Amino acid sequence: MWVRRTLCLLTVAALGQGVVGAPPVAAAGPAPASPAVGAVAAEDTWGPVQRFERNPWGEAMTVDSRGATFAVWASTKTWPHSIKVARRTAAGTWKDPVTIGRGNNPVVGVDAKGTVTVAWERERTGLTTGVWAARKVVGKPWGKPVHLSADKAAPGYPDGGDVRGVANLALAVHPKGATLVAWEWSNRTLPKIQTVFRPVRGPWRGVVGLTPASNATGPLVAFGPTGRAWVAFSRTPVDGPTAVKVRDRRLDGSWIAPVRVGIGQLGGLEVNRFTEVTVAIRRAGAVRTALWSPVAGWQIPILATPADAHVQEWSFASNRHGDAVVVYNRPNGRIDVARRVGKNVWLSPVTLADPGGNSLPTAAVNAAGDMFAAWGSYGLWAAYRPADGDWHATTTVQPDTGVDVLESTLSQVTPAGDAVLMWDQEARPLRVRVMTPS
């Protein structure tokens, strides 16, 4: 899939994808769901809630080019934890979950033919945390898990203390099937970034280190149309601000030297069909995007949100045509959304929800440009924007119950325009719901 989205939050580490941001400001009572100014009074329809298991140790989701949805999570009903996958057909039928391996914190991607790749972390006694991956070709069963990382001896580990080995996985799959997995790695040292590549044909390659042990963290990965790959990551020095850096992998397998593209908190990486790269960064309370093109190189980051937005949590999503959206909450819990048109031109934001206890925003956009945003507190709300229209009025995904804190949100938009929302809520099962726009 070309569509990418990133959830940005300080305290949630689902998917290993660019999880940064400031904590929300709590507010009592239900989160208001007032319609945006000029919102279309459309009647978007939510389907039934699909429930999985409680207390997953990480979850992920992707949608293929035919509209099938793959929900992946780490089940805590076994030890080691089990990596499970459930598929929803394009016709809307959920198939029974299957177990494909053992571990935690899965990430998932799919190519144009429908081949699904899942990677995850796994702890083994006396060794640093490692990375494993499994693939499923359409019409065939899941393959056996493959060990990707170069694990080291760690006597007494895991011991409930600091992570030793792999953390914060990221995965990207090119439409033709090439795959890149990146992670941060440490063993009582400052973390560094490592990657493993799998070509369209052939086995997984060996581990390649992209940085020294220099406090490099939170990698994001993306492919360009030709198969060239990019990795963005943060590097926090002992003194000074956190820098966002990017390295790219040429088709011959060589890596370009890292380039510093901005300062702040990394939250998004996208490469469009013109091989133009966008990196989304939050700095001084505003989201900015840095653009690279083959002709002009890297440009100075520009504002995607107002400079005085005081962005707390935020989510960035984009597609292969360069359409992009940022949904974010302000300190008072108000939910705003901004979208990009043309080459790095951001329109003024629209308010989707009035101040309240709103948090955990998630954004998605499909290849056609249909956009989706959701947010919540003890309940869950959403808004939809078709590619050729305005934002629809806010809909209620789940009424506010006043109990069970929302812990994570993920979203996708299918090629047909349906919105798929996954969320995890304290003491409740992991859930998925699909919305059909009017």
Image (spheres, rainbow, N blue to C red):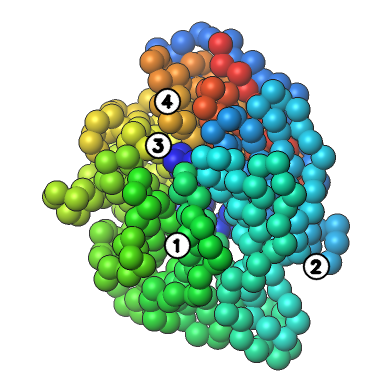
Q: Which label number is shown at residue 80?
A: 2
How far apart, in angstroms, are the residues tagged by discs 3 and 2?
36 Å
Q: Position of residue 316 (x, y in %)?
A: 42, 42
First along the sequence among labels 3 and 2: 2
At 65% from the left and 27% from the top, the residue drawn is: 90
First along the sequence among labels 2 and 4: 2
- From this view, report whether residue 390 is shown above or below residue 264: above
Residue 246 shows up from this direction: no
Q: Position of residue 94 (x, y in %)?
A: 76, 32
Determine the secondary structure under disc 4. loop
At 72% from the left and 62% from the top, the residue drawn is: 144
Which residue is tagged 4? 368
Which residue is tagged 1? 219
Q: Is residue 303 left or right of residue 163?
A: left
First along the sequence among labels 2 and 1: 2
Task: Inspect the image, locate mark 3, and give the three-letter code of the amino acid beneath it.
Answer: Asn
How far apart, in angstroms, are the residues tagged by discs 4 and 3?
8 Å
Which residue is tagged 3? 319
Structural crowding at the residue carrying mark 3, measured as other residues with C-alpha within 10 Å and reported as few (<14), some (14–19) or many (≥20): many
